[in-house]
Image: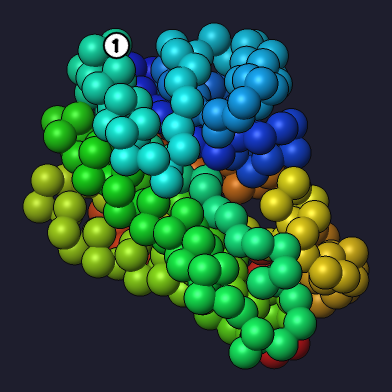
Amino acid sequence: MLDLSGKTALVTGIANNRSIAWGIAQKLHQAGATLGITYLPDDRDRNKTKVAELTEPLSPSFLLPCNVQDDAQVDTLFASVAEQWQKIDILVHCLAFANKEDLSGNFTDISRAGFQLALDVSAYSLIHLCRAAKPLMKDGGSVITLTYIGGAKVVPNYNVMGIAKAALEMNVRYLASDMGPDNIRVNAISAGPIRTLASAAIGDFHKMLHHYEETAPLRRLVTPEDVGNVATFLGSDLSSAVTGQIIYVDSGYEVMGA
């Protein structure tokens, strides 16, 4: 097993025990990393309670709110991280959102507001978090985000999220170039379809799962743990010369013609 002892990892995007971010957090913890967890705040603190109960076995250093559409909240988050850790080694960005109505129907019907929302939460947020994390990555570091094949090819019922993921993937390349001189690596994992809270908004998702399982060379779906294994590699020194890459963890589906 990879050894991440002595490294700190800030993990965003855990919603429940089916989240890909949860699979990543578990694997980072198993490798010895010290975790900090964020949650999306709501009026009744239900998300905070749910994420706190889920992540308790991982003994995170802190559990802090982070709504990436609130600049002040992001600033407060990183100020708190600086006080408690002084540095960040690994930043995990598992944040994406689009209105359900913009994930189906005619692509030309996507609203301006829906387009802006998807790009803001799903793509711009990576730039914002990297800008805030950069001063704390004093010894270099690794930034890991999540994308999907719908950012490179047309996937039914993915619509505006495909555009957001395409933007996210270009963000990875530009950020890798921008942050590389500070020895900060930026990569994305393109995971196969996984049953998560986010995927529930995609129409006919069960058909997509069945198609992947039948078509992918390994003839199986991927799990959050599969993604977590690759994220652990990217967070480790074994990936010291890997940056600006989109790494497919999809049982080989991406190489197929259909």
In the rendered image, is residue 24 in sight? no
Q: Position of residue 102 (x, y in %)?
A: 67, 72
User: Which residue sits at x=55%, y=33%?
Assistant: 40
Relative side of 118 to 3, left or right: right
Q: Residue at x 25, y 22 (%)?
A: 79
The image quadrant that residue 244 belongs to is bottom left
Q: Is residue 4 above or below residue 219?
A: above
Does residue 64 appear to the left or right of 130 in the view shown? right
Q: Nearer the viewer, residue 98 or 187?
A: 98
Q: Is residue 56 above or below residue 221?
A: above
Q: How is the image coloured?
A: rainbow
Q: Quadrant of residue 74?
A: top left
Total number of numbered labels?
1
**Quadrant containing the C terminus in the rendered view:** bottom right
Residue 73 rendering spot, x and y as whole percentages: 36, 31
Q: Residue at x 39, y 40 (%)?
A: 70
Question: What is the x, y in percent for residue 133?
Answer: 25, 37
In the depicted structure, whether residue 163 falls above or below residue 182: below
Farthest residue to the left: give it. 181
Comparing 220 with 182, the one in front is 182
Hey, what amino acid is under mark 1?
Answer: Gln
User: Is 150 displayed left or right of 205 in the figure?
Assistant: left
Helix, strand or loop for disc 1: helix
Task: Provide the residue designation for mark 1.
Answer: 84
* Residue 75, image x, y percentages: 27, 31
At 55% from the left and 39% from the top, the residue drawn is 13
Left/right placement of residue 243 relative to residue 213 reads left
